Amino acid sequence: MTASYIESLHLENVRQFKELNVTFNKGFNFIAGPNGCGKTSILAGISHCFSQHSFQFSRFKDDSQFWADIKINNNRKRIGSGPNAIDSAGYRKGNLKSWVKPPAAEGREILSIYEANKKIKDFCPLFIGAHRNIKYKQISGMQREQPLEQQINNNLFTSSQSLYGEKESNIKQWFVNRYFVIDKDWAQEERLNWFHMIESLPFIGPFNSNFSYVTTGQELEPVFSIYGEECYLEELSAGFQSVLSIIANIFEWVEGTNEPGERIALNAEGTVLIDELDLHLHPEWQFSLREGLSRIFPNLQFIVTTHSPHLLSSAGESEVIIMQKQDDNRYTLQPSEMRFSGWNTDQILSEIMGVKSLENKDYEKLVAIALLKTEEGSAQGLRDAISNLVEVCHPSDSIVTVLKARLASMVALQDD
């Protein structure tokens, strides 16, 4: 059972939020809603609770305050900042004035951001932004990996940078490093993680893709196979690059921010935050991604934003957080108790994503013309309208079927 995760977030006068309170579950959390409602800002707000170096990415006021309530090995803590701690000098110019603890809460240890960095090294969230394309880099050999404390500090220091694509990930170097170390006696955890990842790749690819790792050749170029064809890392499609980048970054984070003996990804706990999880993925792939990630990392908490109705339909009970735009910028959010597996795409788009019109505008105009010709009793006009509709609509469109029946009726009456 997951014992370390983020329970909730409070933001007050941070970014566009007058006030935001959001509760998370310990497994998957899909944050969904219209564009501009603040989904990514929730992830950024969490990053502020763990590092003052992320302040440059947000707008604050003098009375801004924010905190995350977390559970670490079944111990409850509150981490963040109380009011009047930040000098709001302007956009991306928020500077820390003093370490102010967030308000007390019964049963919780209250920590300022500074104290958190010292006292909870065993809880270090991973932030993954929407920019997940892999650029070509020539690797010359194995590269020494940073010590544990340095990796933790670097991960916290660059949390918002990762969200906004200002931190460059080098998963190719990680693949090459693992190529060199997995046969070493001292790399037992790395070896277990490596084979766990390799064996899991076919389960996170789309149906019949047979996504797999093949080898790392003498020139230190990792080679993969999709749909029976071999290709290099940078030749993978944007979707495969995106998913592989997420998975490799999680493995690297698990191994780099945990003590030896606690680096098995299958057992790892903690929180991974991903912006636009569905980016670049075919709808069929979006249906299966949640299950694939859960299979590889069964004990991790995921907090992700998405615009995909297909991802939402794959979510389990109490995994979808619906965020609709509020005029007063005050939000109280929690996972919906509903499941959406039985909802069709249009229903999810309109009622969760806030899409105002799902109809094709040309289609609407052609239907209106057909109805007008029906009222006028013009068989030829209706025949022409139906012909134009057939060119743009689905072959089994029900409205066309009704109009054709109406046309047949009109023609029969005229013949009489």
Image: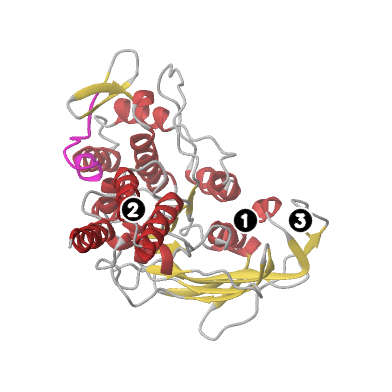
Magenta span covers which residues? 201-215
Give above or below for 6 relative to 92: below
How far across and how far down the image is residue 403, in percent?
Answer: 27, 59
- Mark 3 neighbour density, 10 Å: few (under 14) some (14–19) many (20 or more): many
User: Along the horizontal axis of the image, is 147 left or right of 187?
Assistant: right
Q: Which residue is mark 3?
A: 94
Q: Looking at the image, which is closer to me, 195 or 322?
A: 322
SS category of the residue bearing label 2: loop
Nearer the observer: mark 3 or 2; the answer is: 3
CB contact under 8 Å: marks 3 and 1: no
Label 1 sits on residue? 51
Q: Is residue 59 visible?
A: yes
Q: Tell me the number on the disc at residue 193.
A: none
Depicted 291 relative to depicted 347: above or below: above
| Residue nearest the viewer, comparing 175 with 117 | 175
Q: Quadrant of the N terminus?
A: bottom left
The secondary element bearing badge 1 is classed as loop
The amino acid pointed to by label 2 is Glu
Name the residue: 59% across, 45% down.
161
The answer to whether the residues at label 1 and label 2 have Cβ atoms under 8 Å apart is no
In the image, is 384 to the left or to the right of 146?
left
Q: Which quadrant would the C terminus be assigned to in this image?
A: bottom left
Q: Residue furthest front?
A: 416
Residue 378 at x, y = what percent? 34, 57
Left or right: residue 25 versus residue 17 is left
Please tell me whether mark 3 sits on a helix, a strand or a loop. strand
